[in-house]
Amino acid sequence: MSAGLYFSHPACLEHDPRVHSPAHPDTPERLITLERALAERGWLGWERRQAPPASETQLELVHSAGHVRAIMDLCAAGGGAIDPDTFVGEASFRAALHAAGAACAMTGALLAGESRVGFCGVRPSGHHAERERAMGFCLFNNVAVAAATAIAELGLRRVFILDWDVHHGNGTAEIFRERPDVLFASIHQAGLFPGTGPLQDAGSGAGEGYTINLPVPAGSEEPLWLALLERVVLPAAVAFEPELVLVSAGFDAHVEDPLADCRLQTRSFVEMAGRVRDMALAAQIPVGVVLEGGYNQRVLAECVCATLPALAGEGQAPSGRTAPAQDPGPITARALEQVGRHWPL
Ligand SMILES: [Zn+2]
């Protein structure tokens, strides 16, 4: 049995915002560098699979038909700007279909018991895309399409989505804002694009309590991120009793990322992955990870190469590996108080 399942598709390399915005940070080279590094390491023992395109039915579980058609039509017409950050070319629709399709196919394979862990090395990323709106480099919300598909087509009752990209996963949060069957938790740098995701926003209506927003200040380091994950996010996730964990995995909280100001190290992502893996192992549920941001190519490749073995449970023992996260102070205390209104922390 392989260490895990790695989903990708060559179409994801054809999406290139630089056609319209020459200095755009979301380049195909992000994936090329990552996959070269993985190939040099024998893909870390992971089985590679080609991602199918998402179906219209799958996309329309979280997007309007009008949004899907608007992206298709704009690309077919040669592409252009959607907003000051988000650009498409002719090939972008196909790239986005396979990016969302990767997340769905991974989820299907995990739930069929083919592996305990999967990773989608795809772009464009997805977590900023809302039901009716592409934004922040994202066209379709890959992780949301996968979660909704798991519920609508594969019969799951509860899916937990962790978003550790440094930017708030506003699209995922809005799509599931009123739903109690998806627990969404995001740790993100406060004040950074897109500016959403305050601690007080816990979702709405039937979904109140099922959104966990944990903004952290610029300059935040590993102890705070780990404390929030270990003391707030994961205890709530355990209480939620999910049947699947999906991770919106951006690596742009790394100290060397050019787009943000957090100070995680490569090993910080290994630590986070290890804690998520331990939670999933204890609950006997699979973990599917979907690439989001990460704009220093070398660092992105290094982080993914280090994180995949941790997700697969290699290296340190699954329990007692590391000391519990230290309490870094008032931010964790406020998060415990806020999230503790809804979950037994
Ligand atoms: Zn990001």
Image (cartoon, rainbow, N blue to C red):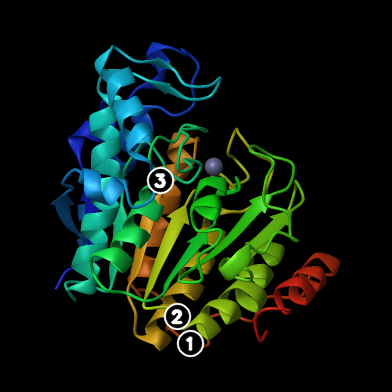
Residue under the point 39% across and 54% down: 143
N-terminal-most mark, 1 or 3: 3
Q: Nearer the viewer, mark 3 or mark 2?
A: 3
Taking the view exactly as shown, the residue that stands out farthest to the right is 330
Q: Is residue 47 left or right of residue 124?
A: left
Instruction: Name the spot of residue 147 as percent of width and height, x first.
Output: 36, 61
User: Could you tell me how far apart the alpha carbons at marks 3 and 2 are, in whole angstroms?
Assistant: 26 Å
* Secondary structure found at label 3: loop
N-terminal-most mark, 3 or 2: 3
User: Could you tell me how far apart the alpha carbons at marks 1 and 2 are, in whole angstroms?
Assistant: 7 Å
- Residue type at mark 1 is Ser
Rendering quadrant holding ligand 1: top right
Q: Out of 248 and 90, give the one closest to the viewer.
A: 90
N-terminal-most mark, 1 or 2: 2
> Residue 200, relative to residue 88: is it above or below?
below
Q: Nearer the viewer, mark 1 or mark 3?
A: 3
